[in-house]
Amino acid sequence: MKKFINKLLVNHSLIYKLFLYIASIILVVYLFPKGGQFKYEFQKGKPWQYENYYAPFDFAIQKSAEEVTAETENIKKNSKQFFEYNEEVVVIVKNEISSKINQLLSKSELTSIQKIELFSKAIKIVNSIYEYGYIETSFISIIEKKQLISIKKGNKIQDIPPYKLYNSSLLFDFINSKIGIQPFTEEESGVLNIISEELKPNVSFDESFTDKVLKENLSQLSYTKGLISEKERIIFKGDIVEGEKLAKLNSIKSEFESQVWSKSNYNWIVFGYSILVALSFLMLLLFLRKYRVEIFENNNKVTFIFFNILLIVLLITLIVKYDAKFVYAAPIVILPLVLKAFFDARLGLFTHVLTVLLLGFIVPNSFEFIFLQIIAGIVTILTISELYKRANLFISVLQITFVYFLAYFAFSIIQEGNAQNLDWDKFLYFSLNGAATLFVLPLIYIFEKMFGLISDESLKELSNTNSKLLHELAEKAPGTFQHSLQVANLAEACANEINANSMLVRTGALYHDIGKMDNPMFFTENQSTNVNPHNELTPKDSAQIIINHIIKGVEKAKKHHLPDRIIDFIRTHHGTTLVYYFYKKEEELRGGEEVEMKYFQYPGPIPFSKETAILMMCDSVEAASKSVKEPTAQAFDNLVEKIVNKQMEDGQFMNADITFKELQTIKKVLKKKLKNIYHLRIEYPE
């Protein structure tokens, strides 16, 4: 049992990776759609590249989205508008008008026959107005759009033209024309006023009944337009995928993806998905193990990479479930941006490609989606060199958006055969995608806090020489501080020449000697007098003090919460080299007797990246340049060659991913910079 527990403890890192691997597979497969997959890929306007295809079962031909939309709009346009006819209003209005006209005529000097005629005219006018109804003014805009409207009178419904309804704008002229010939008599004017005052609208729009009828009509809309029988030919090999053939292929593809699968089929589909997802994640782990060992061995970094992949898969899944048309608004290129900010471009692109391939199982038009996203990812990697510079990010986002526009335009004209049927909404989604990509900077800050990683933006802050730790270094060890500045300038110039991370190496150079703050006077650059404390010590003790600045530097960096990537520079900037001066001094004291090297050797590790290798070279060259008595061009050339070649012979760069060509480039930069620093100036007269 004890051996088993010990094995678990020893292999806990691999066990954690296995758990992360399995958990990620389960989560991604859970998010995938569980319908079947149509095994043929096809595009509108392109030839059918497979054998003659016959229907494997009966299925209905689905109408296209455009056809369904057109029929829906037609139903809405032709759907009837229903209006309620209120009989009670008519009865009340007639009674009021009759009563008031009788009162008016009772006081009139007209004859009985004239009174009856005038009263009869008034009643005819009212009956004419209410024959079909008097509509409220607010509903006039509704009836003007229809050829026929439906009037509900109790249980009866009558379709009439809208012009048969009266409204306030038509009443006055109609009443005037029916009363008599102008000028009106006093009695006629009185009757006219009574009718105008007492008339009230009795027809109103029945919105609830109209909506109910519209919904019933829409519910009867058919989404299919024909039936294909089993073994019926769908398309021949070489036929162009368009028109009716395209509709049939889309229908059977939809049928495959929406079938209700049996439990056995469902399990097989999940099993197939699991294999494909497992292969994708395995490729990522193998890539890390072979080419990014330092990342593979760091569980926190591996978790961070898997977390970002799962985040993108979850985002696309939610968008597709809500509405697949918004899938191009998702800022997927944030994934390579984030990974490039924390790691490197190659890992960012590799992970992006694997993730996009996985998303192909989720999104519609998977080929188009995969092509667009891979191209966008490549452009992202190629265009953004220094993410901490906001202008670079903004320009890169514009370029990515333009590539989206261009690629979609190309796909559209290939499929449609012209540029007239472009979906302009896609261009809006691509623009939203670009705008959302700018969110990468705050996202990087959040990830730094969550996972304890470091980006170029944080490096920029750390490289500020007014920071607390660097200010303390300048106060306690001013010589070391000046040395660090010189090394930082040299290292940055070298990194720029070989396309390494210049911001990282500059920041690492500024902090690489912070361990000298505890005993600054034991380092020659801080000795302002001729007093050398090493004169009182043995070479072995002096060497230990010099070597200890590595350990003290690491301790101080951890105390001030410096990131691990910066601490790596402190650990590796001397590699496993010797404190050569005191080693030789010990040899002299022993009269040439062999000296144990372990007391004079730095603990390492040796540099494991281009950046840490650059710092080792620049640190050694800058320190040695101070001892050159005659600063000539030849002297500096010899110095650089001697130091860098010695480090190569000692195997200090074996683990660093750096080529001979890059080493030669670094040598040239160092020689040039040293000559510029130590060039002779004109002697000014006294």
Image: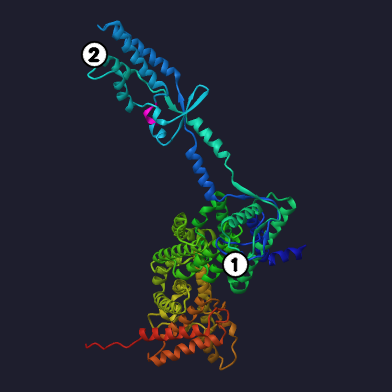
Which is more foreground, mark 1 or mark 2? 2
Q: Is residue 138 magenta?
A: yes
Q: Identify the residue under disc 2.
A: 186
In front: 339, or 270?
A: 270
* Left or right side of 132 for 293: right
Disc 1 + disc 2, Cβ < 8 Å: no
Dot 1, crowdedness within 10 Å: few (<14), some or many (≥20)? few
The dominant secondary structure in magenta is helix
Using the rendered view, name the quadrant where residue 289 is placed: bottom right
Q: How many marks?
A: 2
Image coords of residue 664 (percent x, y)? 48, 86
Q: Which residues are magenta?
A: 135-139
Q: Residue at x 50, y 21 (%)?
A: 154
Amino acid type at image mark 2:
Glu
Can residue 244 be seen by looking at this rendering? Answer: yes
Can residue 32 be seen by looking at this rendering? Answer: no
Residue 512 in the image: above or below residue 312? below
Compute the Cα span from label 1 to label 2.
Answer: 105 Å
The label on residue 205 is none
Q: Residue at x 33, y 27 (%)?
A: 170
* Secondary structure of the residue carrying numbered label 2: helix
Q: Residue at x 39, y 70 (%)?
A: 475
Image coords of residue 380 (percent x, y)? 48, 67
Q: Identify the residue under disc 1.
A: 298
Image coords of residue 590 (percent x, y)? 56, 91
Locate the N terminus by quadrant: bottom right
In front: 308, or 356?
A: 356
* Secondary structure of the residue carrying numbered label 1: loop
Dot 2, crowdedness within 10 Å: few (<14), some or many (≥20)? few
Amino acid type at image mark 1:
Asn
Residue 71 in the image: above or below residue 369? above
